[in-house]
Image (spheres, rainbow, N blue to C red):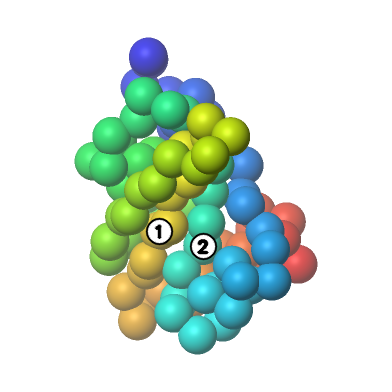
Amino acid sequence: MTLDPYNIIHHPYVTEKTMDRLDFRNSIDFVVNIDATKPQIRWAIEEMFDVEVDKVRTMITPKGKKRAIVRFPPTVQAEDIAMRVGIF
């Protein structure tokens, strides 16, 4: 896997639950490359949006996709990033 942020981050994952997480926990869910590590995901988000990342949590779904829950520090508004991504 090449270190291109667009090869690591595929697209945002949007459901009612993830929208609540966006509003109340300042985090956004993304579908990512199955081989991406947490440091690579953090780097890709920081490169793509020029923001600081607080924490990255990952999970593999039953369908075999990898999701990353990216939490941002209080100085960064996840809603602003969501608007740039096109969630709103």
- Give the class, few, some or many, for how many residues have Cα within 10 Å of label 1's Cα (few <14, many ≥20): many
**Horizontal relation, residue 20 to residue 50: left or right:** right
Along the line of sight, the residue nearer the viewer: 8 or 13: 13
Tags 2 and 1 touching, CB below 8 Å: yes
- Give the class, few, some or many, for how many residues have Cα within 10 Å of label 2's Cα (few <14, many ≥20): many
Give percent across and percent down for residue 22. Answer: 55, 74
Residue under label 1, please give it: 70
Could one spot residue 32 in this view of the protein?
no
Say which quadrant the C terminus sits in.
bottom right
Residue under label 2, please give it: 28
Amino acid type of the residue tagged 1 in the rendering: Val
**Horizontal relation, residue 22 to residue 35: left or right:** right
**Horizontal relation, residue 33 to residue 83: left or right:** left
Residue shown at 69% from the left, 71% from the top: 16
Give percent across and percent down for residue 41. Answer: 35, 41
Along the line of sight, the residue nearer the viewer: 6 or 47: 6
